[in-house]
Image (cartoon, helix red, strand yellow):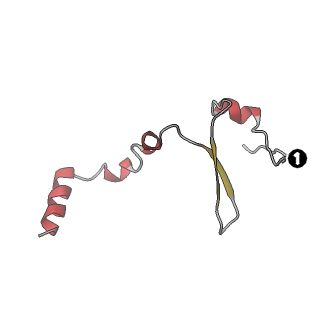
Amino acid sequence: MSYETKIGKKFQVVIPQAIRQKKNLKEGDAIIWDINEATGQITIMVKPQNFAQHIRGLGKEIWRQVDNDNYLEGERNSWQ
């Protein structure tokens, strides 16, 4: 769902109430703004309290079909 806001006199924007409620945003929470230089697209996300916890488990689906012991043994053998 898309929401529209306007930029105020001091270049401030108001986060729509539906988004604040859905993401449980509170006064003082930090927001990260990112711009894709190639497309000009702006992405806004809530800054995690702890980045390490936020990315924990990222990419775990890649390793589901891998036998960890065989993979590790293969890597160790490649060093020799």
Please determine whether, in this image, residue 24 is positioned above or below residue 55.
above
- Helix, strand or loop for disc 1: loop
In this view, which residue lies farthest toward the right? Answer: 9
Q: Which quarter of the figure has residue 57?
A: top left
Q: Position of residue 32 (x, y in %)?
A: 62, 48
Task: Report the front residue among 51 and 70.
Answer: 51
Identify which residue is drawn at 16% across, 51% down: 69
Please determine whether, in this image, residue 24 is positioned above or below residue 35.
above
What residue is pinned by disc 1? 9
Identify which residue is drawn at 65% across, 33% down: 28
Considering the image in quadrants, where does the N terminus appear?
top right
Identify which residue is drawn at 84% across, 48% down: 7
Q: How many numbered circles does the render carry?
A: 1
Q: Which quarter of the figure has residue 70?
A: bottom left
Task: Report the front residue among 31 and 64.
Answer: 31
Q: Position of residue 62 (x, y in %)?
A: 36, 53
Q: Position of residue 45 (x, y in %)?
A: 62, 45
Q: Is residue 63 left or right of residue 42?
A: left
Q: Is residue 56 left or right of residue 45?
A: left
Residue flagged by tag 1: what amino acid is it? Lys
Please determine whether, in this image, residue 53 is positioned above or below residue 34.
above
Q: Determine crowd level at label 1: few under 14, some 14-19, many 20+ residues with C-alpha closer than 10 A.
A: few
Q: Position of residue 31 (x, y in %)?
A: 64, 43
Q: Is residue 60 left or right of residue 77?
A: right
Considering the image in quadrants, where does the C terminus appear?
bottom left
Task: Report the front residue among 49 and 78.
Answer: 49
Identify which residue is drawn at 65% across, 69% down: 38
